[in-house]
Image: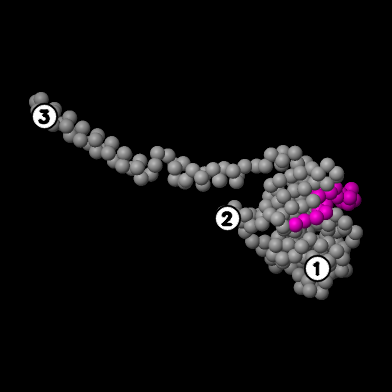
Amino acid sequence: GSKKVFEKNREKLKKTLAILIFIMTLSIFTGCSARNNKPDDTIKDETIENQTDPSLEKMPEDMKTMVEPADSLLMCMLENNITYDPADSTFFWKALYYFAGIYGPSHTLAEVDENGVLKLPRQTLREYASTLFADYDDLLAIPPALNSSIEYNSDWDAYILHTGDRGLSQSEITVFADNGDGTYTITVALKGTVENDLIAKGRFKLVKNEYTDGITEPTYFYSIASAEII
């Protein structure tokens, strides 16, 4: 009887040792934790990249929506290889086209037909222009080169925009600064939405929007005085 018990215990011991050896072998290939799947330097880089700049805590709440006009200008300048120049009618309307085309469909006065054609009242385009250009006075004439993208309909007193898809990207404000002279500076990063990769950065100087008081339920309380890709 004692011999059978001994043999039985020996078999249990062999099985236990085999399991322990398997576990030890597995830990060699997989590492001690999930964190070791990436090198330490990669983990540190990701942590730094995902940190929020402390300056954003001082940014006024009503400035957060300015990411939208800044995003539109950044895309316009980048894709057309042009600089910020509100006095140039081509730039003026290209910038408006991007801004209205991307964010106009969500406006309360916007109409979008089954083909994706966007109709916006002239007052809405004036609102957008006062946001994009701090020295805005009135809408410029549409240059002939843009007639296929934007047209004015006098019967409706509205602009018709034939828009497209912005692609897989989005922008965010990454840095804020109060310049102490009634102006503010924000840095905006345009990133891909799939891998969160940086496409471009822009720096924008802002001032209070003088036209806000005349707008019913305004969305943008500041105007852009200058813009550049950095």
Q: Residues in magenta?
A: 206-228
Q: Which mark is residue 4?
A: 3
Using residue 206 as the reference point, say whether residue 32 is left or right of it.
left
Q: Do the residues labelled 1 and 3 touch (CB within 8 Å)?
A: no
Q: Locate the C terminus by quadrant.
A: bottom right
* Residue 155 seen: no
- Counting from the top left corner in percent of width and height, residue 116 is at 71, 65
In the rendered image, the residue lying farthest to the bottom is: 144
Could you tell me which residue is drawn at 11 percent across and 29 percent down?
4
- Counting from the top left corner in percent of width and height, residue 170 is at 66, 54
Name which residue type carries label 2: Val
The CA span between labels 1 and 3 is: 96 Å
On screen, 32 above or below 2?
below
Q: Viewer-nearest of labels 1 and 3?
A: 1
Indicate which disc, 1 or 3, sits on the residue closer to the N terminus: 3
Using residue 24 as the reference point, say whether residue 79 is left or right of it.
right
Secondary structure category for the residue under label 1:
helix
On screen, 20 above or below 71?
above
- Determine which residue is flagged by label 1: 90
Secondary structure category for the residue under label 3:
helix
Q: Viewer-nearest of labels 2 and 3?
A: 2
Could you tell me which residue is drawn at 87 percent across and 68 percent down?
141
Any magenta on residue 219? yes
Indicate which disc, 2 or 3, sits on the residue closer to the N terminus: 3
Q: Which mark is residue 127?
A: none
Q: Which mark is residue 194?
A: 2
In the rendered image, the residue lying farthest to the top is: 2
- Counting from the top left corner in percent of width and height, residue 112 is at 74, 62
Name which residue type carries label 1: Thr
Residue 94 vs residue 12, the one in the foreground: 94
